[in-house]
Image (cartoon, rainbow, N blue to C red):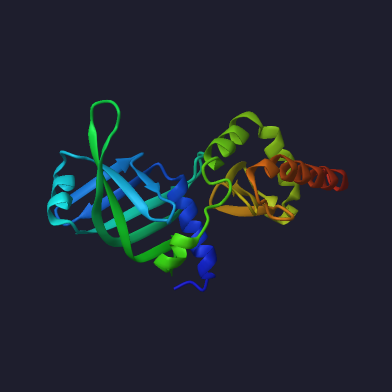
Amino acid sequence: MSNTHPDASAQRLRTIVAAATSLELRTPGHRADLINRHSLDSRGRIQIDLPVNSRLATDIAHQREVAAVVEIADVAPTPVRERIRGRGTLSGWLTPVAPRDTGDGDEELTVEFDLATIELSIDGVTTMVDPVDFAAAEPDPLATEEAELLCHLDRHHPRTVEWLCRLVAPRHRYGVRRVVPLRLDRYGLVLRLERVSGHRDVRLGFTPALRHPDELRQRMAELLDRGATCGRRSRTWLS
C-alpha cells in the first residue's frame, strides 16, 4: 500500500470522479458502461441516473439496496502511450433517491452510491481512501477544464510546449523524440517525454500552487518566462 497523504489521495480521486465522463458499474447480475450519467452532490455523494425501465433500475427500486462496484479510469486526453493515469475502485450500495423527468419524454431513476471502501491506483501503487475523506475533499480547480486545455495546448501550441521543455534538465531530454502535455492541475503542468523505448513524466511546478482557474494564464506566463531564461542560458533542445 502507498503512504500517500490521505487528503491528497482523496482529492486526487475526487478530481478523477469530477472530470470523468464515464464509469463502469457492476452489481450482482449486471454490468454497465455508463456515459455522462454520474454526478457529485453537495455532500460529496456520487449519484447515478439510470433509465427507469432498465433491469438494474427495476432491481434497485424493488430491493431498495443493491451491492455495487464502480470503476472510474483517469484517462489522459492527449495521445500518449499508456493513457491510463490512474484508476478508482469504489464499492458500496446503491439506493434509490427519486425518479427524474429528463425533459425529452424519458424518465430516469436517480440512485445514490453509499460508499464502503475506496481504492486509488496510481502507477501500480494502490492507496485506500476513507469515504469520509473522499466526501470532504475538493476536486482540483482545473478538473473539468483540464482535458480541453491540454488538447488545445497539444494541437495548437507545439512551440509553446517546446519552449516549456527547456525547463527540463538536459539529461532528461537526451534521446527524447516527442513531448506531449500529460496533466494540468493546481500544482503545475506535467510533460510526457517519449523516447523510442519508454518515457519519462516531468512536472513543471506552479509557484505558488493555483487556487482558481482564473490564475492559470499568469502561472503559464511565469513558466514561459522561466523557459525563456533557460533558453538564453542554453540553446540545447531535443538531443
What x and y, as percent, mark residue 216? 68, 43
Q: Is residue 143 left or right of residue 28?
A: right
Task: Note whether 152 is above or below 226 in the view shown.
Answer: above
Residue 83 in view: no
What x and y, as percent, mark residue 236? 79, 45
The one of 170 and 175 positioned closer to us in this rendering? 170
What x and y, as percent, mark residue 46? 36, 53
Task: Note whether 212 is above or below 12 in the view shown.
Answer: above
Quadrant of residue 203 in the image? Answer: bottom right
Residue 171 in view: yes
Q: Residue at x 28, y 25 (%)?
A: 104
Q: Which residue is drawn at 21% across and 49% down?
A: 31
Quadrant of the snapshot with the N terminus: bottom left
Quadrant of the snapshot with the C terminus: top right
The one of 154 and 237 positioned closer to us in this rendering? 154
Q: In this view, does 102 lie to the left or right of 183?
A: left
Q: Which residue lies furthest to the right in this view?
A: 232
What x and y, as percent, mark residue 136? 48, 62
The one of 145 and 173 positioned closer to us in this rendering? 145
